Image: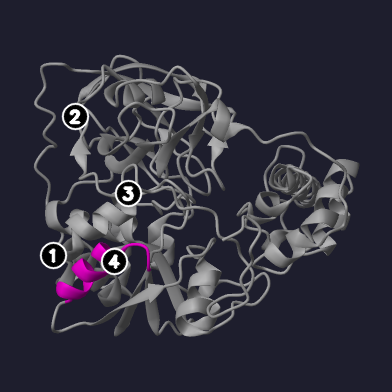
Amino acid sequence: MSLFDLDFGSGFRHGVHPPDLKDLTSGEAIRRMPFPDMIVLPLKQHAGAPARPLVKKGDRVQRGDRVGEAQGFISSPIHASAAGTVRDIRRWPHPDGSMQKAVILDVDPHDPQVPRPRIVPEWSELEAGQVAGAVRDAGVVGLGGAAFPTHVKLSPPEDAEIDTIIANGAECEPYLTGDHRTMVEHPERVHFGLRVMMHALDVERAVIGVEENKPDAIEALRRTIPDDLDISVVSLRAKYPQGAEKMMIKSILGREVPSGGLPLEVGVVVQNVGSISTIARVFESGYPLVERIVTITGPGVRRPSNLTMPVGTRIADAIEFCGGLTEDAERVVFGGPMMGNAQADLDTPILKGTTGIVVLTEATAATGPQYPCIRCGRCLQACPVFLDPADLGQLARAGQFEEMTELDLDDCMLCGSCAYVCPSNIPLTQLIAAGKNQVRRLRRLAQETEDGEATDEGESADGSPEKDAA
């Protein structure tokens, strides 16, 4: 199939067909990586507000102890992924390219690294809000990359009519195989996590969507479906970005999430299978999210692997365990090559939402020279949410950010399909991402200005609320 072949068949329209490149690790069983000497735990590991530190330099912590407290509803606590001593709390390189405050732990080399015994919540006796609370306390977030706090999805508005849970097992990004191996090796855990979610959301039906290029995962999940649950496993066409929420809903249920809308508006909650498996572990052991499965792969790493590793493990330690870099290694990417971020510092740590580390070589990382847009329309045909990426990219270059919002910028999920098919090698995804960041900044400034004006009008000189004159 040609690099630029596009799809107009069943499921969702548009999208692209990059080679899946999963053979390096799709047959590699999950192994456990030894604990490194140092763990770095950024307080920003999830969508929403960063956590607030609860420890100070010199404190001793055990594996599973809370070191960061959630701030607000859309936030998540951070837990120590290893026993050790807090070396420092300071800014550290973050996968998004910024410097973020992090708790730095010196790992105790003599500790057995067994989490403290914890009370295991009996899920079947908990009300919906209590289940969501237990998931929140465990720091569970979406493990598919976005890291949206899972308890929020388990707490829909009272007027929301949820009838279906979709377990996202598509894993459509090239190279990545952590979800694949989770479904093959731990299908019962996926089903148990779904059981807990179905109880919390009072939903009777769940569907697990898996791309057809993972037949062993489909077979394992179907073989282990509990007799008392209405769970079905759907084989989906291998197409990118099949794993996006809106695309999954369209492919499986034929429902279309409206522009600017959320899945709950069409009666659906979508959750990544890795997150569902983590929910199961919370209610099996009581342990919080302190480790995750990460795929270390690509032609630039000597021993590609699927590893269970502590959250906060540095890139350098993970790659060293996998045999190190090849001589022609050129680029290290967090996540898959379509949506991932290239990293400038090998001290950058693994986060809760880190799905993989892909190491590309000089040959595979080459993008070629960039040319002017020829208005061929391929990006229009590729975009799964029917935007005009070429126009959005030009507006971003011109700094016309307000005009970008008029072209439904918020609907862009930065899937990278447009850049993938562009014959001029225009970095459309990066341009649009920069535009989205600027729009967020402008909105934040506008909100701060509005809040400041409201404060000026509603407070007295000493900052206390003014009382009504009457």
Q: Identify the mark at residue 122; answer none if there is no mark.
A: 1
Quick one: SS at disc 2? loop
Q: Could you say which is closer to the camera, residue 413 or residue 154? A: 413
Q: Indicate whether residue 223 is drawn in magenta.
A: yes
Whole-Å distance between the Cαs marked 4 and 1? 34 Å
Q: Which circle, 2 or 3, is nearer the viewer?
A: 3
Q: Which circle, 4 or 1, is nearer the viewer?
A: 4
Q: Indicate whether residue 80 is drawn in magenta.
A: no
Name the quarter where the N terminus is drawn: bottom right
Quick one: SS at disc 3? helix
Whole-Å distance between the Cαs marked 4 and 3? 15 Å
Query: Which residues make up the magenta segment?
Result: 212-225
Q: Main secondary structure of the magenta part?
A: helix
Tell me if 138 is positioned left or right of 315 in this view.
Answer: left
Tell me if 120 is positioned left or right of 242 in this view.
Answer: left
Q: Could you say which is closer to the camera, residue 453 or residue 443? A: 443
Give neighbour class at mark 1: few <14, some 14-19, many 20+ (Cα, 10 Å): few
Q: Identify the mark at residue 62; answer none if there is no mark.
A: 2
Give neighbour class at mark 2: few <14, some 14-19, many 20+ (Cα, 10 Å): many
Q: Identify the mark at residue 215; answer none if there is no mark.
A: 4
Quick one: SS at disc 4? helix
Q: Which circle, 4 or 3, is nearer the viewer?
A: 4
Image coords of residue 124 (percent x, y): 16, 72
Q: Could you say which is closer to the camera, residue 318 or residue 76? A: 318
Image coords of residue 335 (percent x, y): 47, 42
Q: Which circle, 3 or 1, is nearer the viewer?
A: 3
Q: Identify the mark at residue 296; answer none if there is no mark.
A: none
Identify the residue shown where x is 46% and y is 21%.
Answer: 346
What residue did someone put label 3 on?
Answer: 178
